[in-house]
Image (cartoon, rainbow, N blue to C red):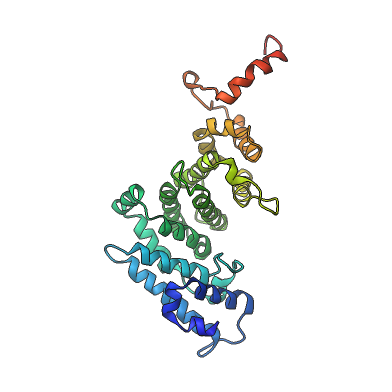
């Protein structure tokens, strides 16, 4: 592994080299610290990679292909999942300040003209690498102002990554949900940030729910371990918000109510759909305006059968 991370140029372009760093940090550990130690060499190398990223993203027209490659390797070195076991401890062990790279991304996504261009013609690999980097690095954020900016950035990221009927919806939505979950985990421990009335945070949950409604049931089938990673991730996201901040999910239900009704007839989606539809049932506001109510086709077809067992008043 030392032969790998001593080659700085290799870390910038070779994901295998970055994963070697993850193995050394998360599984081998450090015997010593200080100049000349393995930890020192890794610290210098990974810090240099982050500096290259920051220098590139601060240019007038950043090279997204280079940024994507560098950010992907940086994520892997910090314990992001690739071919090695993911690790959540690398950032704390390396003690590398990631605020510069996060701030560079925040500034980029706050450039409205750039976001508009990417929304119409996105370079998807870059935005996916941003989502995975947020999942790994956001644990370093501890102030409300930065979290507020990150919630707005996540909203824009979701708008780019999660267009309806995208062929890669399963992959892009999974990475996005991981970023949302990591963001919300940090928010719960931050004293000067509140999810209440945060429109951006509510909207990222709307985007995740739209993906849930739009995604094909075939993509959600259990694997050989009888589990579906996508459904596990979405279910966890919904469960956590139902327990801690159910009001954040109301816009998602109102926005996707018809699709959620249809999802009740799909076994893999039924539980989550029911939880979301049950949420506004406790609220006095109607799901749809009286004149705009539309009964989904699947339910309308079943109404004649249901009426047979109902009293006249029902």
- Looking at the rendered structure, the number of numbered marks drawn on it comes to 0
User: To which quarter of the image does residue 39 belong?
Assistant: bottom right
The one of 166 and 34 positioned closer to us in this rendering: 166
User: To which quarter of the image does residue 220 belong?
Assistant: top right
The residue at 39%/74% (across/down) is: 51
Residue 231 screen position, x and y as percent: 62, 47
The residue at 58%/46% (across/down) is: 219
Q: Quadrant of the N terminus?
A: bottom right
Residue 245 visible in this rendered orientation of the protein: no
Residue at the left extreme, as displayed: 60
Q: Is residue 167 depicted above or below 111 in this figure? A: above
Q: Is residue 244 depicted above or below 79 in this figure? A: above
- Residue 284 placement, left or right of 50: right
The residue at 36%/52% (across/down) is: 122
Residue 166 visible in this rendered orientation of the protein: yes
Residue at the top extreme, as displayed: 312
Residue 222 screen position, x and y as percent: 66, 48
Q: Is residue 143 depicted above or below 269 in this figure? A: below
The one of 210 and 304 positioned closer to us in this rendering: 304
Q: Quadrant of the C terminus?
A: top right
The residue at 60%/82% (across/down) is: 30
Q: Is residue 157 depicted above or below 21 in this figure? A: above
Residue 70 screen position, x and y as percent: 42, 69
The one of 304 and 243 positioned closer to us in this rendering: 304
């Amino acid at each position: 592994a030392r032969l790998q991370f001593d080659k700085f140029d290799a870390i910038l372009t070779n994901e295998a080299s970055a994963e070697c760093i993850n193995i050394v940090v998360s599984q081998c550990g450090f015997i010593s610290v200080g100049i000349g130690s393995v930890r020192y060499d890794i610290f210098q190398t990974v810090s240099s990679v982050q500096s290259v990223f920051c220098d590139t993203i601060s240019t007038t027209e950043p090279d997204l292909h280079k940024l994507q490659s560098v950010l992907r390797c940086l994520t892997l070195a910090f314990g992001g999942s690739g071919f090695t076991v993911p690790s959540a401890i690398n950032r704390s062990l390396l003690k590398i300040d990631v605020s510069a790279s996060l701030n560079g991304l925040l500034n980029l996504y706050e450039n409205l003209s750039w976001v508009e261009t990417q929304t119409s013609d996105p370079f998807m690999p870059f935005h996916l690498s941003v989502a995975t980097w947020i999942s790994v690095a956001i644990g370093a954020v501890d102030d409300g102002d930065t979290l507020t900016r990150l919630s707005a950035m996540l909203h824009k990221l979701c708008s780019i990554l999660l267009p309806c009927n995208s062929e890669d919806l399963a992959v892009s939505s999974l990475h996005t949900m991981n970023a949302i979950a990591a963001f919300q985990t940090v928010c719960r421990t931050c004293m000067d940030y509140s999810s209440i009335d945060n429109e951006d945070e509510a909207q990222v949950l709307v985007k995740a729910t739209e993906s849930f409604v739009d995604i094909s049931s075939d993509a959600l089938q259990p694997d050989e371990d009888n589990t579906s990673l996508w459904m596990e991730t979405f279910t966890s996201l919904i469960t956590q918000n139902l327990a801690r901040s159910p009001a954040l999910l109301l816009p998602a239900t109102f926005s996707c109510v018809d699709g959620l009704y249809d999802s009740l007839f799909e076994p893999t989606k039924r539980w989550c759909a029911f939880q979301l539809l049950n949420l506004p049932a406790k609220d006095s506001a109607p799901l749809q305006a009286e004149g705009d109510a539309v009964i989904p086709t699947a339910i309308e077809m079943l109404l004649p059968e249901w009426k047979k067992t109902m009293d006249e008043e029902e």
